Every structure is written in C-alpha cells, then in structure tokens.
C-alpha cells in the first residue's frame, strides 16, 4: 500500500515537472518569433525598386542619399502612341470606334533595385 502511494506521488511529481517545462519552452519560442518578425520588417524597409522610362533619369538622387544599386535591368516600353482614322471618311471626334491607336516610339525602361 505504501509503495503504491509513493509511486503515485512520484508519478504526479513527474507529470507536474514536465508540464511546467513545456510551457516555458513555448514562451521562449513566442519571444524568438517576435524578434524575427521585427528583423524581417526592418530588412523589407531597406529595399526599393525605381523605374525610369523613355530617357528619364534621376537615379543620382538616390545614390547621393546612400542607396546602392543591387540589380539593374532594362525592359522595352512604348513611350508614345499615335492615333489615326481607320477610313478616309472617319471623323475621330464624333465616332471613337473608327480610331486606330498604334505605338509611335518604342524606348527602354530601366529598372533599378536599390538597397540601403
């Protein structure tokens, strides 16, 4: 009888100790994940994408403020559009359906990925 009481007391003590330890571990994990979220937000604020198209420039302002170009590439882009009537008797002011729009000038769009 005494052995069973001692065994049950030992069993309850072990259950109590292991449950307290797991709660403490969970609290540490929650604190660590909050720190990681804060670091990820700070990193995201330090990257920027800037686009200049059809001969525009202005990247020197960012470079003077301490930004560094991490990646640069160009894409083809239509700079201006040209409209003309579809037929000779078409009035583009009155009838919008007879207006044809085509690209006039095709240029380049420069994309800069900046880091600070």
Image (tube, rainbow, N blue to C red):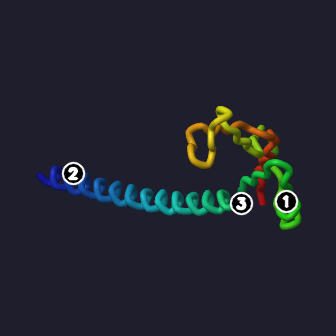
Taking the image as shown, residue 102 lies to the left or right of residue 18, namely right
Residue 76 screen position, x and y as percent: 77, 38
Spot the residue most to the top.
87
The residue to which callout 1 is attached is 58
The image quadrant of residue 81 is: top right
Which label lies toward us, 1 or 3? Answer: 1
Which of 72 and 25 lies nearest the eye of the viewer? 72
Dot label at residue 7: 2
Cα–Cα gap, marks 1 and 2: 79 Å
Residue 63 screen position, x and y as percent: 86, 61
**Circle 1: element type:** loop
**Circle 3: element type:** loop
Taking the image as shown, residue 35 lies to the left or right of residue 30, namely right
Work out whether mark 3 precedes mark 2 in sequence or the reverse, and give the earlier one. 2
Which of 68 and 10 lies nearest the eye of the viewer? 68
Cα–Cα gap, marks 1 and 3: 19 Å
Taking the image as shown, residue 52 lies to the left or right of residue 9, namely right
Q: Do the residues labelled 3 and 2 touch (CB within 8 Å)?
A: no
Residue 61 screen position, x and y as percent: 85, 64
The residue to which callout 3 is attached is 46
Specify few, some or many for label 2: CA neighbours under 10 Å numbering under 14, 14-19, or 20 or more: few
Work out whether mark 1 precedes mark 2 in sequence or the reverse, and give the earlier one. 2
* Residue 71 seen by the camera: no
Which of 83 and 48 lies nearest the eye of the viewer? 83
């Amino acid at each position: 009888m005494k052995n069973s009481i001692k065994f049950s007391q030992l069993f309850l003590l072990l259950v109590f100790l292991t449950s307290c330890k797991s709660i403490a571990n969970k609290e540490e994990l929650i604190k660590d994940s909050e720190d990681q979220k804060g670091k990820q937000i700070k990193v995201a604020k330090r990257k920027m994408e800037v686009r200049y198209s059809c001969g525009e420039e202005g990247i020197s302002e960012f470079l003077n403020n301490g930004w560094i170009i991490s990646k640069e590439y160009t894409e083809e882009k239509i700079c201006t559009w040209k409209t003309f009537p579809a037929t000779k008797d078409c009035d583009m002011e009155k009838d919008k359906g007879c207006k044809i729009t085509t690209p006039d000038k095709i240029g380049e769009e420069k994309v800069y990925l900046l880091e600070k």
